[in-house]
Image (cartoon, grey):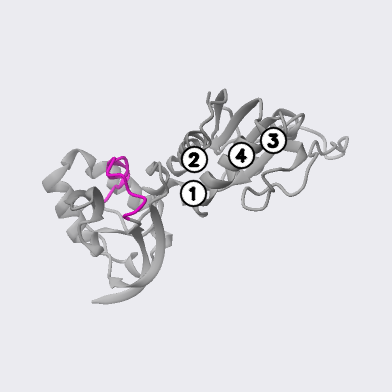
Amino acid sequence: MKVKRKIITIDEELCTGCGECIPNCAEQALELVDTPNGLKARLVKEFYCDGLGACLGACPTGALIIEEKEVEAYNEDAVIARIKELTPEMLESHKQHMEEHAHELPALQLQKTETGGGCGGCPSVQMLQWDKEETAPKETVKLESQLRQWPVQIHLVPPSAPYFKNADLAIIADCVPFSYGNFHQDFVKGNAIAVGCPKLDDANAYVMKLAQIIQTSTPKSITIVKMEVPCCSGLVRVVEQAMKEAGSSIPFETVTININGEILN
């Protein structure tokens, strides 16, 4: 049965056959196939892919995207059988994957399997909530913004903007400001910034834009500030690829923030 839903699509021109996407697919829906153009990643079967994009951040070239189209419905029972056959050690990981994101595939929430889960997806969209105690009085000193530029989105910033010239550049995942309380003081102050999401946006377009910034403005350093979720690692690969495209190597560091607003490294 075919339904209209989201599913992974692979751009074979961008795919290098590196295989980095495969271990990031909890459903084992991807495989490498020997084609006339070399090794390429392919979907094994449409019904193995839940369409939630846990593999997106693993692709160094941005060859994986999510599209909505008429395809076979996701089949959880078939996925379980495939995992048991190929990688039984991943069954618990798949169970957690499904339980965390059952709300994203409502049509499949009632399909219980022997894993005990419903349906799932990438940890970046796991629904969580927690309470925090007040640690400061409600009447506090208003903090000033440290932002020195506009725009800030990677898609919108002009590569030749004067604020990029010889700057310390912070490339920031767009969930970071909501998670990290001291965001302006630690990552905006004194820096030029470029903000984006490697999961929801076109990673290849990011590579091209950042390569232009590196070529035309030669920033002094780059700090990548990302969240702990796997797909956010795509931001690191975007920067590495951009430097390769620009033919330039700039010192860079990566800072990872967890969803509780703590720096992990």
Q: Are marks 4 and 3 in contact (CB under 8 Å)?
A: no
Depth check, mark 3 against mark 2: the one in front is 2
Instruction: Give the amino acid at mark 2.
Output: Val
Q: CA distance from mark 3 to mark 2?
A: 26 Å
Depth check, mark 1 against mark 4: the one in front is 1
**Mark number, residue 181:** 3
Residue under label 1: 203
Foreground: 116 or 146? 146
Instruction: Give the amino acid at mark 3.
Output: Gly
| Residue 121 visible in the snapshot | yes
Depth check, mark 4 against mark 2: the one in front is 2
Q: Which residues are magenta?
A: 12-27
Residue under label 2: 238
Q: Position of residue 86 (x, y in %)?
A: 14, 45
Quarter of the image holding residue 178? top right
Report helix, strand or loop for mark 4: strand
Q: Are marks 4 and 2 in contact (CB under 8 Å)?
A: no
Residue drawn at 79 percent across, 39 percent down? 147
Q: Are marks 3 and 2 in contact (CB under 8 Å)?
A: no
Q: CA distance from mark 1 to mark 4?
A: 14 Å
Q: CA distance from mark 2 to mark 1?
A: 7 Å
Q: Position of residue 18 (x, y in %)?
A: 29, 40
Report helix, strand or loop for mark 2: helix
Quarter of the image holding residue 48? bottom left
Instruction: Give the amino acid at mark 4.
Output: Ile
Q: Earlier in the sequence, mark 4 or mark 3?
A: 4
Q: Are marks 2 and 1 in contact (CB under 8 Å)?
A: yes
